[in-house]
Image: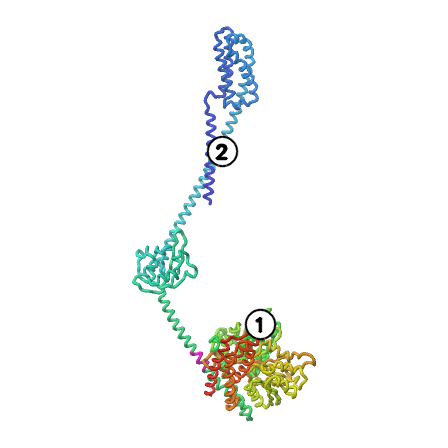
Amino acid sequence: MQTGGAASALLLCVGLVVWLGWLVLREIDDFSVANSDNLQWSLAQADVEFLQFRLAMKDAQDNPAAMEDVRRRFDIFYSRMVTMSSGRVFHALRESVQSSAPRMRVLDFLEKTVPLIDGPDQEFLAELPSLLQQSEQVTADVRSFSLAALAAFAEVSDSRREGITELMIYIAAVLLALFIGLTLLAYAMFRLFRLAQKRADALQFASTRMKTIVQTSPNAIVVTDEVGVVREFNTAAEALFGFTRAEAVGRLALELMVPAETLGRHQFGALAFLDEHRRPRPEEQHFEITLQTRDLHLFPAEISADRAEADNPLYVFYIRDISNWKEAEEQLTEARDRALAGERTKSEFLAVMSHEMRTPLNGLLGAMQLMRDHSLTERQGDLLDRMQSSGRLLLELVNDVLDLAKFEAGKMKAEEAPFSINRLLDGLVETAQPLAQTYGNELNWRWSGPEGDGAIGDARRLRQVLLNLVGNALKFTRDGSVEVEVEYLDAARTEVEFRVIDNGIGIAEKDLARIFQDFETLDSSYAREAGGTGLGLGIARRFMRLMGGEIGAESEPGEGSLFWIRVPLTPVEAVAAAPEEPRDHPDAPQRPLDVLLVEDNEINRFIVREMLEGEGHKVTIAENGQAGVDAAALHRYDVILMDISMPVMDGTTASGHIRGGTGACAAVPIIALTAHALPEERERFRKVGMTACLTKPIERPLLLRTLAEVTSGDVPALPPEPGVAPAAAPLLTVVQPQQEVPAAPETELLDEERLGAFLSEVPRPTVDKLLERFYAEMDRNIAALAETAPDDPDLGPVAHQCAGSCGPFGVEALRRALGRIETQVKRGDQPSRAELAALADLWQQSRSALESRLEAA
């Protein structure tokens, strides 16, 4: 840009010099006029010639023969005056005011004299005296004219000299500017030369460096033109393909390197951009392909390709032999498959062994529970307590292994249900209190910051994690304190942090990173005394990951420890249902109760009646809701167990009639029995005046504790006023804990824990009778369901009846499938025909598994 400006300025200066030179030449031309046009000479001659004309006239007076001389002198003077009147050099003089008047008088004299000069001699001689007299006056005019003209000429000459001087100054200035411009242009050209020289050196260096890189690259580099002819072939390419550079350059790259049998496929595939003469798209720039060497040896290659746009576009290919990498990949894949197979085998082994261990454990624990129904000595009671404690510890270990196997199999999912944080922590402290007293520790919990309560999340796993952290804190603390803090981390209350703080022995910093690993225990005196498998924190870490939360720890040896978990929870204003876990020693009613059981399922009626009558309670049966309403109106019972889905009249309607009537049981607690209930259904239970809700299948400890709570007045049922809709009594929802199992061949169909508890509590002859009815009922109803239309109004009730029958026998997979269908019907959706048809096959698998399990037992 600077060079262009300097060149433009230089051209301008050259133009000015040419123009000024033209002006000088014109002035020189003006000064080079002939001598006849010389102004000063002409003016001087005019005066002389007029005097000679006068002398000639005087001579003609004396000698008439001199008339020709007079005419000649007149013509000369006349010619001089005409020249001064019309000549180019006399233009400035003619415009002079001083010379104009005398000149005009002289010309007037001449014009008057011309006729005499041209006339006969006699007339001229006659007028000659008069002309001589007039010529005296004209002589003065000629002199005045000459002097004035000379003065004007002097002024014109001075002006011309000044113009020439200015012109020469302009020429000098322009020449100076031209010189400076030429100097600057020369400097710019010198800089351009140096810059071009540096760029040439840089290009030479870059070319040398690029050539060195290309030649020393471990990858083969092949450069082709737009039609695919090889233009460059580096040393690595020579070694890889077996061609020299001289042999490769000038040949088609595809014919040189790609096997003929795959050439056509690649031209329309990975190498399509070559035929289309375009730059490869990003996804086309890296690909794998099979190439060949000079001796036709095939090898897998990884290629990176791109196009250099220029006047003559080039394609650049970086080629790497990945034979070793492919071989290593195959070996790694094989090793991974073997490891996964081993891991699956280990997981299946753990799952099967855990279930096989849990089955006899459930039998032992059930038998121990039944033994307490008999009179025992104090020594026998102590031994039974220790046996039950050891059995529960072993069962917890088995459950930990099952949780671990289920998580690793990817079949564990977080639950979403409303619960009360305050109730959860109250129950946590109550459960862990005996352990705290064993080690002389104080245990409590508190809110840090604004208090809250209701939340939606996986309360069961959250409680399990907190119970593990609290249990560890208590075991590693002696005569100290353990406190659980809970705090909202954001204003929206969507993230909650729980902190378990103790002042026990603490943990070294180097051990904090490994305490969350599986089977990891610390080597300390308390640890040896406390023992443990080291699975608890590993499972807690997995549970927090499942719930989208975090877990961590801070500690100082001798100063205590702080374990924290952060978990996202959805806040709710009020919790209509708060899950509770059964206690280690569940409460039972302090007196025999008179119970009305309203249940349409024969098997469920038998199970619940056996549980209650075994505890000394009296049970009256009603097979549908209408029968329940009639019985409740005639006799006052201590409590009513009300199934929800029944023929004739459902449990919700029956409860509304009981609460709204004036019968004997209008204020009696009513406990809802349901396989599963939607949140909106639980709200309806509360509105019709139900006191509590139990989910099927029912376990005896949980049933007894619930009866104790509703009959002791802890959860009172408020009867409605006459003529007013039933009052919204507080609803105690007791969610039956469901033991999740991993996907093992048979155990995924059955809930071994529930089946084991059933077999341990019910005599075998009774079991056989119930099974006979169960098989007959399920064969009939499942076959009907498999062929039922999705919009059949009887679909929901039949699915509910079958699901209720599955519960006591632990037929868990089928029970859940039926529950999903019932939920769809309740929500106004329709299950698919394929889902209904699949029930028949699932029932046959479940029946085979159940028969095999009972045969083994």
Place of residue 676 in the rendered image (x, y in percent of width and height, measured from the top left): 56, 79
Q: Which residues are magenta?
A: 345-352
- SS majority, magenta: helix
In the displayed structure, 284 sits above or below 568; it is: above
Q: Residues within 10 Å of mark 1 (few under 14, many from 20)?
A: some
- State the residue at coordinates (58%, 83%): 647
- Residue 253 visible somewhere in the drawing: yes
Closest to the camera, between mark 1 and mark 2, is: 1
In the displayed structure, 503 sits above or below 76; it is: below
Element assignment for label 2: helix
Q: Which residue extends farthest top?
A: 62
Q: Amino acid at mark 1?
A: Thr
Q: Which residue is mark 2?
A: 170
Place of residue 79 in the rendered image (x, y in percent of width and height, measured from the top left): 49, 17
- 523 or 279, which lies in front? 279
Q: Residues within 10 Å of mark 2 (few under 14, many from 20)?
A: some
Q: Which is nearer the N-term, disc 1 or disc 2?
A: 2
Tell me the quarter of the picture where residue 671 sits: bottom right
**Disc 1 from disc 2: Cα separation:** 93 Å
Tell me the quarter of the picture where residue 692 sits: bottom right
Q: Amino acid at mark 2?
A: Tyr
Q: Is residue 769 highlighted in magenta?
A: no
In the displayed structure, 26 sits above or below 400; it is: above
Q: Which residue is mark 1?
A: 570
